[in-house]
Structure formats: structure tokens, C-alpha cells
Image (cartoon, rainbow, N blue to C red):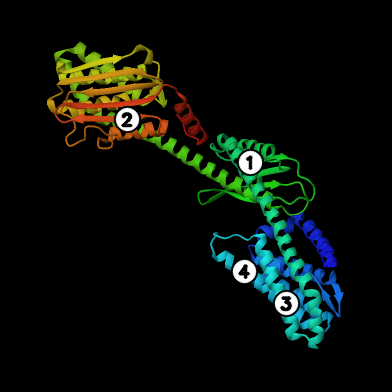
Amino acid sequence: MVQMAIRMCVIATVAFLFTRWRPFRRLVVSCADRREKVALTVIFGALGIMGTYSGVPVLGAIANHRVVAAAVAGLLGGPWVGLGAGAIAGLHRYALGGFTCLACGGATTVEGLLAGLVRAWIDRQQGSLRLRPWMGWLVGLVGESLHMGMVVLFSRPLPEAVALVRIIAAPMILVNSLGVAIFLTMLEGVRAEEDRARAGQTHRVLEVAGLTLPYLRRGLDRASAGAVAALIVEHTGASAVEIGRDGEVLGTAGVIPPGVRPARAELQCGTERVGWVQLYGALPGEPGSTEVALVRGLATLFSVQLELGHLERRAALATRDRLRALRAQVNPHFLFNALNTVVHYCRADPEAARRLLLDIAAFLRRTLSEEADLVPLARELEYMDAFLAIERARFGNGLRVVKRVAPEVLAVPVPSFSVQPLVDNALQHGLWPRGGRGTIWIEGERVGGRLRLTVRDDGIGIPGSPEAGNGEHCGLGLRNLRERLAACYGTDFLFDVRSRPGKGTAVTMVIPLSAAPGKWEDGLLQAAGGGG
């Protein structure tokens, strides 16, 4: 018993040194594919042979620790790994000869298979049961008891087999079952260390992802790749990082140690491969599981950031295209009626016709030349005044406009062509069916850190519409305006439509006072090659 315990300590020390070896740790933690399982089978088969040589000779046989390696192999890798490791160690024992060679060699194979079946049963519990050291102790206890029974059954002469079992049964059953539990305790510690390392990697990946978002939103180029590579080296402890595209390195940071192989992952934008990232560790040879997991996590988040940036640029470009389409729609929609009004005034009131032509010129100049996405509210109201002057000329004094705009909000930036569609909506849907007679109120005020702008009328309302809504039931102009606000401000805006048939309609939009959304959109357009 004492000699076996001492030899088990030696084997446990060797096993501990194995757990410090990075390839072995990777095998223990994953053991996922066929190559890893074959490697695990060979390693534990060799440990089983070592357990035979470290045994104690007793009555022409060997009291050994061979079963520890076979049982641990089965508990880690499943039936085939346990059977393979047990067969390697068992065939070696059979080749050594002796009257117990068949029983001992066969018992080692059976014990490895038994441990693998226990692992398969644990896996079938779908996470409700985990491999614990006490399970290894129980497997060793049952396996070594079976081993002693096989020695008695298959070894001859029988009296010598019985005498042998009386001497070695208790030491082998107790020490080897304890040895399996010790092995599993060490391997559980390895897994706990890997879990902590992965948790740290996840934290570092998320930290780096937050820092790199402003760079990758504008796309992958030399400037963004260089900045991202430097951030990865600074916050992950990697020796060096390279980011590239199509065989060309766009950005690099750090110093590549000699003999180090990189961990590499691809960058995707949707289904399209747009680049790659390589991360170098500190140790020579193949990259470890830490570097592989880290670079894959970073590549996944970077791919998401690149795709989001691509979608944002497309949304900004779509908004700009929609704005240009709106400008193009205003001219033919409005110009024909305006010119007919001028013709009418040329004979009756030439001075009024001259003023009307100036208003038309101002309106068209703004429509054709305005390229800014955000303009001061005062400028937007000037454009609306030119539009209303032409409409008043068409409908006479029946159209009344009341403006109640606080002076402190006149400099607030608003999306260009945002007030005119509201006024046009009030005219078309509210007052035109009544011959252009009625009142339009335009109100603007500051509410906290926001601008509230309301255009309401006392016209016929929108037939069949709810008393409140988001504008989706209204015309194309209001829907386009709402989509433009969403593209500029995300969810940080309010667009409310209230209409009562026969009583009128009120459209209210509430937007931030800051001009930051417009600047953000301009930056996206410039990155995409757009802009005025």
C-alpha cells in the first residue's frame, strides 16, 4: 500500500506537469475532433504503460497503476478513447508475460471502455450532470474490483491467483480509485483556469470592440486598420496584430516574436469576405487556444461593426437620394400652377405678378441649390414663406397663416425641406377641398433640450384616420419626412399626427436641439463617397 501510494504521487506529479503543457491543456478542454481524440488516446495509452513500469512486483505479477490512465482517458474522451488507451496499455502488459498477463491486459481494456460508457451516459444528460472527481473514484473502485475478479477467473494456477489477489486487491482498489479522482481534480482545475481565461478574453474583446467601433463604422482602410491593430495590442497583451485585405497588410502594431505562428480569422460583411486579422502570441510554435479564441471573438465583433457601418452608410445615402427625389418632385408638382397664377396677375396687377415671380425664383433657387442636410429653422421658414406667398396668390385672402415661433429656436438646425411638406400637407388635405379657405398655424418652441414644431389647420381633416398616429396613414410627403427623421435621429425623435374629420389636422415633430445627428450623417456620406 505504501509503495503504491508513493508511486502514485510520482505519476500525479508527471500528470501535473502535463497539465502545464499547452497542447495537452487544449486536448483536455476540447477533445472535439477525431485528431484530438487520437492524440488523447496515444498520450493516455503511454501513461498507462508508465503505470505498468512504476508498479510493484508481487508473486510473479505487478501491482500497478495502469488503470488510472485508461479510466481517465475514457472519462475525458468517451468510449473509443477509453477503449483505445486501455488497449494500448493492456497489449503492452500482455506482451510482458506472466500468469496474469491475459487477465490484467484484458481488464485494463475493459476498464477504459467502462469509463468511456460512463462519459457517454453523462453526455446524454444534456448538461444536467457534470463529470466530477467522485465519479472517477467510483469508476476506479468498480473497475479495479472487476480487475480482481478477472484475475481470479482467468489466471492459472488458481491458488496462486487467489493468493495474489489477497495481497494486491486492497492497495490497487483504494490507491487507483483515489488516483483517478486526483487526476480528475487536476483536470477540473485546468478547465476552471481555461474558463477564467475565456471570461477575461470576453471582457477584453468587448472592451476592444467598444473602442474600435468609431473606426470600423467608416469601413476598413489603412487608417482604421492601423488604429484598430494598435488598440488590440494595447488592451489584449498580444505581441503583434496584423489586419489586411486581399493579401495586403493594411495595418499592423507590435513586434512579431521569432518562430511564432499567428492565429487568424476572416472578416465578413454579410456574406462577403472583406479582410482578415492575425494575432501573434508570445510563445513560439502554433497559437494557443487563448489566441485562437481571442482572434475569433474579435473578428466576429469586427465583422458586425463593419456590416453595421455599411448599413448606416447605405441608409444615409438612401436618405440623401430621397431628399433629392423630393426636390425633383416639388418642381413639376408646384411650378405649373404657380406660372398660371403669374399669367393671371400680369394683366390685372403687374406689380403683384413681379413680386410673385420673385417668390417663385427664391423658391426654385432654394429647391435646386440646397444641399445641406440640416439648416437653421429661420432659413427653413423663409423657404416656407416663399411657398405660402405663391399659394396666397392662387387662393386670395381666404388663406390665413399664423406663425408663433419663439426667437430662441430660430437658429436650431432642422432637416432641410421639413416644414414645407407639413404646410403642403395642411393645404392639400385640409384647405384645398374648401377652396383654400382656412387657417394654418405654425408653432415652434423649446421644450427642455428639444425643439417642438407643430403645423395644424382647421380644414376637413383626414377622412378615416385615427385621432392620433405616427404619420404612416398619411400621404407620401409625411411618410418620407418621418423616414428622414428616423435616418437622422434614430429613435430620438417624435412624429405625431392628430386628425379629426371636419375639425382639422395637427402634425407635430420633436427633435433634439443639437446638430450632432446631421454631422454624423454627413460623415457617413463622405465615407461612402457621397455628399453635395
In the image shown, does 89 or 440 lie closer to the viewer? Answer: 89
Q: What amino acid type should be assigned to the residue bearing mark 1?
A: Arg
The image shows residue 122 at horizontal and vertical percentages of: 58, 65
The residue labelled by disc 3 is 147
| Front tag of 3 and 2 | 3
**Label 4 Cα neighbours within 10 Å, binned few <14 / some 14-19 / many ≥20:** many
Disc 1 versus disc 2: nearer the observer:
1
Q: Give amino acid for label 2.
A: Phe
Sequence-wise first label, 2 or 4: 4
What residue did someone put label 1 on? Answer: 204
- The residue that label 4 is drawn on is 118
From this view, report whether residue 228 is shown above or below residue 363: below
Camera-side residue: 72 or 294? 72
Classify the position of the C terminus by image quarter: top left
Does 305 sit above or below residue 154?
Answer: above
Q: Is residue 357 above or below residue 42?
A: above
- Helix, strand or loop at disc 2? strand
Quadrant in the picture for residue 328:
top left
In the image, 68 versus 387, the foreground residue is: 68
Look at label 3 and name its amino acid: His
Q: Earlier in the sequence, mark 4 or mark 1?
A: 4
